[in-house]
Image (cartoon, rainbow, N blue to C red):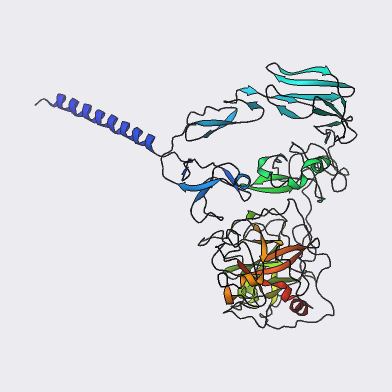
């Protein structure tokens, strides 16, 4: 029997088969859709990552007014461009960036028909192959063939970006009709171009940067140095970054220049904060932080993170000796002869302009933008609330209508991330709560309650900080104008049917809708009762949602922030002709004052 030829034949067949299988495997692998590229119903690709609601997203999302179907942005900044489409996942998409033609000077972005390179500074060109020119005096990059002026009094030069680099030639000019240069700088113009001649030590397009300023005095409102790192070590974003384009409009133009804001990433204090700060990206979201810059009275290198004044945080403990009063429905508390409401309330720590109109469909709230919001953890569920005084919080009665024991309730102030505490938060236990005596669960009329937190050594949350501040109560029966833009905030579900709370505090701007319109049969009909108000957009898209219950609807009145609504009920989330319904706080101001006096 010829065994060897047979074995040779089998070996050959096995090798051939393995090669065939390997080739098929490679062929099939090539046919697999590339992860990271998603086609949309518009025929365009999703742009990942994209910015929506101050968050960066790397996949299709369900949240917002376009949800709950999965959708994505077609540009890198949905907040600015509003360009979007629904996702068609699982469709084969060719990766034109497979060989990374933009490396090492740029990042490749694949399109349906090709690619384009997003160049890093200081590069430009189709493949980022060309160097830009850097002008040390203005701290700006210029593209090839760009021209600009450089002024070092009395010498004026006209500069250009050439293949050889920056080339300047002396020229003549005349004084500008209006001097926009700062810190004693002189403005000169030539052929419609202008330049600033800066005083010694200052640089920048408008002399807004002081090179040798390494510390700040007072609250740093006049700081013009080049510090660009925060207390956590995060790098500052450029003030003209498209990520924060909407956020810095209140600092735009000449007003921004006066505050030292320009095309740079240096720390500034344009809003009168306690010290210089800047915008940063943290955990894929836009945020801000104070900067790691010493006060001029400190030695360099000894800077510590800014001190945050707050009340000590009591925690639940098995050996806690304090008594825990039972839940109360009393309409009268102990009278001590005073109204327990702070005079200084409704303060704004506004890093940005008014919230972009249009939480569902809202934005991630910046830290300290809602210092009055309270997070109520009630046994196994959650509600929002509003701090109105050191010891008292307003919330919805339906959050407490199961009469939970006070030992099952904790209150967290200063929180920006759901169920997460940090150096800015204060956690307090509850002494008692008071439901409105006429609250009726079937109709949710009079859906308001008060929660009193326990004091420690006579103090509750009286040591207020930038992150913990009380909200003002409105005058009795003085409703905010129906056209006024108010703001709702909370950690509730971001779309109908969502299983989880939002991790970051959400906010949305919306108008109060006239009561008669809310009562119309096509809206809420006879479910709208006295003591209620509705707010939102009749076309839908923005609303409070499940989990926002008890939280605040606030409006600015005469320069201060007032609590005008308590999140109560609604029909779905952000549906057309179904604006959210709130307890109208103006109908209960006297009741609140009577019960906390």
Quarter of the figure with residue 465: bottom right
Residue 316 appearing in the image? no
| Above or below: residue 519 compared with residue 498 | below
Image position of 258 with respect to 349: above or below: above
Q: Nearer the viewer, residue 301 or 355?
A: 355
Residue 468 among magenta residues: yes
Instruction: Identify the main secondary structure in magenta.
Output: loop
Return the x and y of residue 539 as percentages of the image width and height. Answer: 58, 60
Q: Residue 316: name its quadrant.
A: bottom right
Residue 58 seen in the figure: yes
Q: Is residue 362 above or below residue 533?
A: above
Considering only vertical position in the picture, is 403 above or below 355? below
Count of numbered badges drawn on the protein: 0
* In-image side of 91 versus 447 (left or right): left
The residue at the far left in this view is 1
Q: Quadrant of the N terminus?
A: top left
In the rendered structure, which segment of residues is drawn in magenta? 461-476
Residue 565: percent from left, percent from top = 68, 69
Quarter of the image with the C terminus in it = bottom right
Which residue is rendered at x = 70% and y = 40% of the image? 235
Q: Nearer the viewer, residue 331 or 198?
A: 198
In the rendered image, which quarter is residue 487 located in? bottom right
Q: Nearer the viewer, residue 379 or 491?
A: 491
Residue 76: x %, y % from top left: 59, 41
- Asked if the magenta segment contains residue 156, the reply would be no
Between 146 and 444, the residue placed more toward the observer is 146
Query: At which x and y percent is residue 549?
Result: 62, 68
């Amino acid at each position: 029997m010829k065994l060897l030829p047979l074995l040779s034949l089998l070996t050959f067949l096995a090798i051939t088969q393995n090669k065939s299988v390997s080739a098929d495997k490679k062929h099939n692998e090539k046919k697999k859709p590339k992860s990271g590229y998603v086609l949309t119903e518009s025929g365009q690709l999703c742009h990942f990552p994209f910015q929506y609601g101050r968050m960066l997203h790397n996949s299709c999302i369900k949240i917002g007014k376009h949800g709950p179907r999965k959708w994505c942005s077609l540009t890198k900044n949905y907040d600015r461009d509003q360009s979007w489409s629904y996702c068609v996942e699982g469709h084969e998409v060719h990766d034109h960036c497979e060989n990374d033609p933009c490396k090492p000077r740029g990042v490749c972005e694949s399109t349906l028909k090709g690619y384009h390179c997003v160049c890093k500074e200081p590069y430009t060109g189709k493949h980022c192959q060309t160097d830009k020119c850097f002008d040390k005096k203005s701290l700006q990059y210029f593209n090839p063939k760009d021209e600009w002026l450089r002024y070092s009094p009395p010498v004026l030069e006209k500069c250009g970006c050439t293949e050889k680099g920056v080339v300047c030639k002396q020229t003549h000019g005349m004084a500008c009709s209006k001097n926009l240069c700062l810190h004693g700088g002189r403005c000169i113009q030539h052929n419609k171009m202008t330049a600033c001649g800066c005083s010694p030590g200052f640089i920048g397009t408008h002399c807004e940067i002081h090179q040798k300023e390494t510390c700040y005095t007072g609250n740093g409102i006049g700081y013009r140095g080049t510090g660009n790192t925060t207390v956590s070590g995060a790098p500052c974003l450029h003030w003209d970054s498209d990520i924060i384009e909407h956020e810095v409009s209140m600092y735009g133009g000449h007003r921004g220049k006066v505050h030292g804001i320009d095309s740079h990433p240096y720390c500034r204090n344009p809003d009168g904060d306690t010290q210089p700060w800047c915008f940063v990206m943290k955990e894929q979201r836009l945020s801000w932080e104070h900067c790691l810059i010493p006060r001029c009275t400190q030695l360099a290198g000894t800077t510590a993170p800014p001190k945050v004044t707050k009340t000590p945080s009591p925690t639940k403990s098995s050996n806690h000796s304090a008594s825990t009063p039972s839940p109360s429905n009393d309409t009268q508390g102990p009278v001590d002869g005073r109204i327990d409401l702070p005079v200084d309330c409704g303060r704004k720590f506004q890093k940005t302009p008014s919230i972009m109109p249009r939480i569902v469909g809202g934005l991630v709230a910046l830290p300290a933008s809602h210092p009055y919001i309270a997070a109520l953890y009630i046994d196994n569920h959650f509600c929002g609330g509003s701090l109105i005084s050191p010891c008292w919080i307003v919330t919805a009665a339906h959050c407490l209508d199961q009469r939970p024991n006070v030992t099952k309730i904790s209150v967290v102030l200063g929180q920006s991330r759901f169920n997460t505490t940090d150096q800015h938060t204060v956690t307090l236990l509850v002494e008692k709560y008071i439901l409105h005596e006429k609250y009726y669960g079937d109709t949710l009329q009079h859906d308001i309650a008060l929660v009193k937190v326990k004091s420690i050594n006579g103090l509750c949350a009286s040591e207020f900080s930038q992150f913990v501040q009380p909200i003002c109560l409105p005058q009795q029966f003085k409703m905010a104008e129906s056209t006024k833009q108010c703001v709702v905030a909370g950690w509730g579900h971001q779309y109908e049917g969502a299983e989880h709370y939002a991790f970051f505090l959400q906010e949305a701007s919306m108008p109060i809708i006239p009561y008669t319109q809310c009562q119309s049969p096509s809206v809420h009909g006879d479910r709208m009762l006295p003591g209620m108000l509705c707010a939102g957009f009749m076309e839908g898209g923005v609303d409070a949602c499940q989990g926002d219950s008890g939280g605040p609807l606030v409006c600015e009145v005469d320069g201060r922030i007032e609590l005008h609504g308590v999140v109560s009920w609604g029909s779905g989330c952000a549906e057309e002709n179904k604006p959210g319904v709130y307890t109208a706080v103006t109908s209960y101001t006297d009741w609140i004052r009577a019960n906390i006096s």
